[in-house]
Image (tube, grey):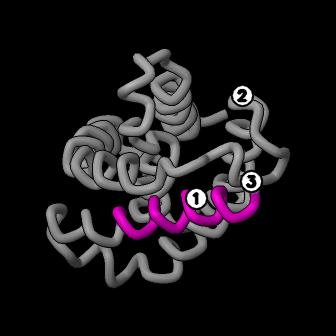
Amino acid sequence: MSRNIVIIMLTFLLAILLMLLQLPEAWQMFRPEWVMLVLVYWALALPKRVGVMWGWWMGLLMDVLLGAHLGLLAFAYALATYLALKFYLQLRQYPVLQQTLPVFFLVIFVKLIAATMAPEFVGRLVWGPALVSAAVWPFIFTVLRWLRRHFHIR
């Protein structure tokens, strides 16, 4: 396994750990979609390496870890990855702050899919994660871009 794949997997592992981190009840509705943010970054940065199947497998893993209906987040993450890949040429040309709006809508999209398919799993937690995910996108983008450049991931 190449060093590049190992580093990409480690970023996903960190995102999964952040998603599993216990937060106080009041803060639960503001948890960013860490895994999806990392997924979107790698899909935009390396569209030939990180694709829809990565979204599917990361979503399936999150389904198992979060106790969601099997395939719920897998479908949502795969679809969000597909949309990011479909428009990656347009999204990559925007400055990072202008990318926050498409990221916001991708998170809303994932949350609405999950809420439609399993309302008891998501409830009304749609806007909070989307706003916080969009707010942390510049930080995620900057850190992951630094990692990609530092380790020469191509």
Looking at the image, is mark 2 or mark 1 earlier in the sequence? 1
The kind of secondary structure element at disc 1 is loop
Q: Amino acid at mark 2?
A: Leu
* Depicted 1 relative to depicted 102: above or below: above
Total number of numbered labels? 3
Residue annotated with mark 3 = 118
Residue 113 picture quarter:
bottom right
Question: Residue 113 in magenta?
Answer: yes
Q: Left or right: where does residue 136 sit relative to residue 58?
A: left
Q: Amino acid at mark 3?
A: Ala
The kind of secondary structure element at disc 2 is helix
Q: Which residues are magenta?
A: 103-117
Mark toward the viewer: 3 or 2 = 3
Q: Residues within 10 Å of mark 2 (few under 14, many from 20)?
A: few
Residue at position x 44%, y 46% from top? 38
* Residue nearest the viewer, comparing 22 with 5: 22
Looking at the image, is mark 1 or mark 3 earlier in the sequence? 1
Q: Which numbered dot is residue 49?
A: 1
Tell me the CA gap for discs 3 and 2.
16 Å
Mark toward the viewer: 2 or 1 = 2
Residue annotated with mark 2 = 65
Q: Left or right: where does residue 61 sit relative to residue 51?
A: right
Residue at far right of view = 70
